[in-house]
Image (cartoon, rainbow, N blue to C red):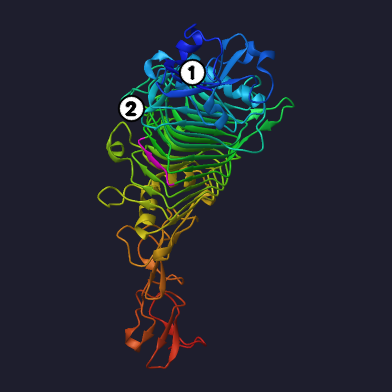
């Protein structure tokens, strides 16, 4: 029997004696007190797993999905049998940005975790448009789903001394290890910390500094989490923290197979950090105006592709200044930091960098990583400001080795080549650069000459210097015992250095500080054949071979005067 009670609200029907029915109908049509939806409740005697309600009603009647009307009279919300997502507003959440909605979020979380314990697969929660303020961590079940109506208007905010959201296998045992199957999804939401409403200025000093406990999403000891279309702003710690976990036997369990697509990070101390994690894919994400965009610690085989990094300049962390411009080289402000000997096989590809003070930091012992096909537009106004004099595309700290930059583009807004400046610490070695254009190679050499001199040559560590190529122009420079490192050049440059090599008309010349010379020490380009009177005694050196076309045989310079001899030593 279906009974329409003239659209009594759910709270009116279940919390009062009205209507006072003797025989309660099998189905009741009501209006939801919080969402104004028309909903059906069905009379039930069992939980979803088939056990009798009367055996444990005090524990498991949640007051939203399962409700009690009278003695031994129980109803369940009809949609629960269709396995649809739970609307957070069914549990009393207001979403007005003022009301504390923590209790509603806790009730929804408790319900889905209870179903998980009973092996009932109901674990999806829906967040409609609204601004939901919470003061405690919202726990999401592993292999569940949290979905907003839109990332613009479905907003969860909270100034919590801990994570705003955390994914768990078990709410009663938060340290339980991950499961090996299934996928958890969080999508179409905005998540905000204490400074969610701040204007996104390039630099606003935060006197309280970095607060590592304040996190947007904490994911630890988990597999297969997918984050999609999230807007994450204003966290004094981490927007997202992927962490490994310590097991009871002292072993470490990492976090693997993570995917982020279309996520936007702004005004966070650190947008994303991963510790002892692997197989993380970031695709089409944006990191703007954080103190630090991405920080990988001892994490390997991760991919950052098609992402945008812009003006990730210190806000919560130590900021560079005119009095201490080098402090950001100690990793306070940057777009990407790779740290730890295990940081290998990380690929950064097809990304866009603009307005950062340092784009990528390869910390001590980081090796075997690739930066490919990226666009570096420079530090814009900050590379011209006295407070920020040391913009770097990348920093290679001690023992950072065998990292590869290839096929990247370096341009400013007016298509000029910007400073292609790097920072090399003395023990950084075997790093390789493959440039698209010879102009990039020449800028790389010119813009880093002082750093090469100070880091390598002055410390007798020339063998640690990087190697670079410009394949399109068939040019390269190598580390060797020159005073400077320079490319092989095909046209004589305006500025020359000892041991520069000039290739011209099929001949090779070397700059000796005064003139270009050939391998035998003679001046580059001296005539080597012709009539007897065309040979040049002033530029010739002992042993020089000259083919005399009048004598029809070679002759040789005997000494630095004008003496010439035949092959047998007799005067020519």
Q: Nearer the N terminus, badge 1 or badge 2? A: 1
Give above or below for 234 relative to 349: above
Q: Name the residue beneath numbered marker 1.
A: 91
Give above or below for 96 relative to 416: above
- Left-right relation of 336 to 112: left
Q: Residue furthest right?
A: 249
Mark 2 Cα within 10 Å, few/some/many (few <14, many 20+)? some
State the residue at coordinates (52%, 46%). 460
Residue 118 picture location, percent across and down: 67, 25
State the residue at coordinates (31%, 51%). 417
Distance CA(mark 1)–CA(mark 2):
40 Å
Residue 153 picture location, percent across and down: 36, 28
- Can see residue 171? yes
Residue 55 picture location, percent across and down: 69, 14
Give above or below for 285 relative to 102: below
State the residue at coordinates (44%, 86%). 555
Callout in the foreground (1, 2): 1
Along the line of sight, the residue nearer the viewer: 7 or 164? 7
Q: Which of the image's four quarters has the C terminus? A: bottom left
Secondary structure state at the residue bearing disc 1: helix
Let me know if residue 508 is in the magenta part.
no
- Left-right relation of 98 to 105: left
Q: Residue furthest top?
A: 17
* Quadrant position of residue 7: top left
Along the line of sight, the residue nearer the viewer: 228 or 480? 228
- Write the start and end of the magenta stretch as one range: 306-311
Mark 1 Cα within 10 Å, few/some/many (few <14, many 20+)? many
Residue 556 picture location, percent across and down: 45, 82
Along the line of sight, the residue nearer the viewer: 445 or 520? 445
Q: Residue furthest left?
A: 414
State the residue at coordinates (51%, 24%). 165
Q: Name the residue beneath numbered marker 2.
A: 203
């Amino acid at each position: 029997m279906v009974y329409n009670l003239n659209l009594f609200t759910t709270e009116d029907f279940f919390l009062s004696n009205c209507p006072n029915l003797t025989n309660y109908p099998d189905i009741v049509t009501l209006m939801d007190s919080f969402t104004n939806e028309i909903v059906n409740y069905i009379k039930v005697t069992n939980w979803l797993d088939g056990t009798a309600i009367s055996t444990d009603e005090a524990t498991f009647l949640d007051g939203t999905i399962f409700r009690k009307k009278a003695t031994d009279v129980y109803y369940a919300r009809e949609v629960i049998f269709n396995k649809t997502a739970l609307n957070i507003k069914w549990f009393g959440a207001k979403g007005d940005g003022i009301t504390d909605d923590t209790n509603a979020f806790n009730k929804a979380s408790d319900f889905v975790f209870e179903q998980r314990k009973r092996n009932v697969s109901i674990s999806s929660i829906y967040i409609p448009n609204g601004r939901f303020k919470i003061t405690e961590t919202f726990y999401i079940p592993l292999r569940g789903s949290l979905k907003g109506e839109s990332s613009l208007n479905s907003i969860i905010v909270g100034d919590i001394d801990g994570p705003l959201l955390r994914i768990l296998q078990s709410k009663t045992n938060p340290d339980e290890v991950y499961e090996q199957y299934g996928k958890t999804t969080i999508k179409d939401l905005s998540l905000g910390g204490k400074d969610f409403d701040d204007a996104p200025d390039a630099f606003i000093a935060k006197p309280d500094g970095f607060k590592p406990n304040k996190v947007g999403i904490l994911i630890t000891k988990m597999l297969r989490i997918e984050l999609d279309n999230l807007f994450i702003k204003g966290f004094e710690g981490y927007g997202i923290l992927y962490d490994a976990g310590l097991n009871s036997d002292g072993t470490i369990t990492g976090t693997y197979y993570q995917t982020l697509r279309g996520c936007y990070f702004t005004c966070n101390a650190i947008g994303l950090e991963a510790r002892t994690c692997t197989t993380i894919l970031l695709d089409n994400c944006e990191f703007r105006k954080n103190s630090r965009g991405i920080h990988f610690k001892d994490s390997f085989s991760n991919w950052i592709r098609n992402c945008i990094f812009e003006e990730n300049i210190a806000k919560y962390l130590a900021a560079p200044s005119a009095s201490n411009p080098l402090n950001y080289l100690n990793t306070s402000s940057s777009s990407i930091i790779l740290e730890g000997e295990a940081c290998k096989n990380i690929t950064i590809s097809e990304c866009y960098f603009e307005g950062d003070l340092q784009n990528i930091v390869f910390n001590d012992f980081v090796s075997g990583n690739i930066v490919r096909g990226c666009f570096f537009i420079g530090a814009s106004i900050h590379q011209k400001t006295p407070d920020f004099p040391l913009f770097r595309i990348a920093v290679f700290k001690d023992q950072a080795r065998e990292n590869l930059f290839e096929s990247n583009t370096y341009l400013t807004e007016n298509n000029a080549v910007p400073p292609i400046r790097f920072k090399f610490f003395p023990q950084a070695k075997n790093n390789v650069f493959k440039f698209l254009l010879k102009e990039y190679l020449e800028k790389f050499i010119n813009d880093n000459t002082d750093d090469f001199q100070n880091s390598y040559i002055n410390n007798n560590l020339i063998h640690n210097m990087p190697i670079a190529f410009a394949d399109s122009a068939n040019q390269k420079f190598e580390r060797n015992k020159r005073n400077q490192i320079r490319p092989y050049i095909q046209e004589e440059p305006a500025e020359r250095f000892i041991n520069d090599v000039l290739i011209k008309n099929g001949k090779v010349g070397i700059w000796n500080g005064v003139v270009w010379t050939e391998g035998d020490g003679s001046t580059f380009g001296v005539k080597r054949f012709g009539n007897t009177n065309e040979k040049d005694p002033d530029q010739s050196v002992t042993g020089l071979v000259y083919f005399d076309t009048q004598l029809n045989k070679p002759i040789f310079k005997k000494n630095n005067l004008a003496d010439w001899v035949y092959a047998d030593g007799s005067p020519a």
